[in-house]
Structures are given as structure tokens and as C-alpha cells.
Amino acid sequence: MRTRQSICRKKARFASEAEARAAAARSGLLLLPYRCDRGGHFHLTSRTKGKFLRRLRR
């Protein structure tokens, strides 16, 4: 699903996937980076449906 331009402008943008992952780690929430199809930068999402998530080791 394409991100609408108006939504893209409202979201935080990151220049690289590494920057997005660092921001996700700081948040303390389960957030995943993805490349925006509008501008090529990265955003964060909390949607995990259909995504492969690594299990945490205990």
C-alpha cells in the first residue's frame, strides 16, 4: 500500500535505516523501519502483521 503524500509529510523522516532503527530503540516500543515509496527516506511503523519478527532470547 502506498503512503499518501499528506501522511508522509506528517511522519518523522530518517535519512538511513540505521537512524530509524536507533530512534525505534530509543522509543522503547516495537517499531519497525520501512523505506517510504514517496521520497526514499525511512519512517517507523508499529504494524507487524505479516512481518517476520525475531524472537527474543531469554
Image (cartoon, rainbow, N blue to C red):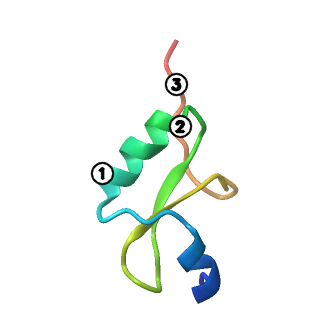
Up-down relation of residue 55 to residue 21 (above or below): above
Horizontal arrangement in the rendering, residue 45 relative to residue 54 (left or right): right
- Closer to the eye: label 3 or 1: 1
Horizontal arrangement in the rendering, residue 31 relative to residue 20 (left or right): right
Q: Amino acid at mark 2?
A: Ser
Residue 20 image point, x, y percent: 40, 53
User: How far is mark 3 from mark 1, CA to CA?
Assistant: 20 Å
Q: Earlier in the sequence, mark 3 or mark 2?
A: 2
Judging depth in this view, the residue of 32 and 11 nearest the camera is: 11
Q: Quadrant of the N terminus?
A: bottom right
Q: Which residue is mark 1?
A: 18
Residue 4 image point, x, y percent: 63, 86
> Residue at image x 46%, y 35%?
26
Q: Secondary structure at mark 1?
A: helix
User: How far is mark 3 from mark 2, CA to CA?
Assistant: 17 Å
Q: Which residue is mark 2?
A: 27
Q: Amino acid at mark 3?
A: Leu
Q: Earlier in the sequence, mark 2 or mark 1?
A: 1
Residue furthest front as drawn: 10
Q: Earlier in the sequence, mark 3 or mark 1?
A: 1
Residue 14 image point, x, y percent: 37, 62
Up-down relation of residue 20 to residue 11 (above or below): above
Q: Which residue is mark 3?
A: 56
Q: Residues within 10 Å of mark 3 (few under 14, many from 20)?
A: few
Residue furthest top as drawn: 58
Q: Residues within 10 Å of mark 1 (few under 14, many from 20)?
A: few
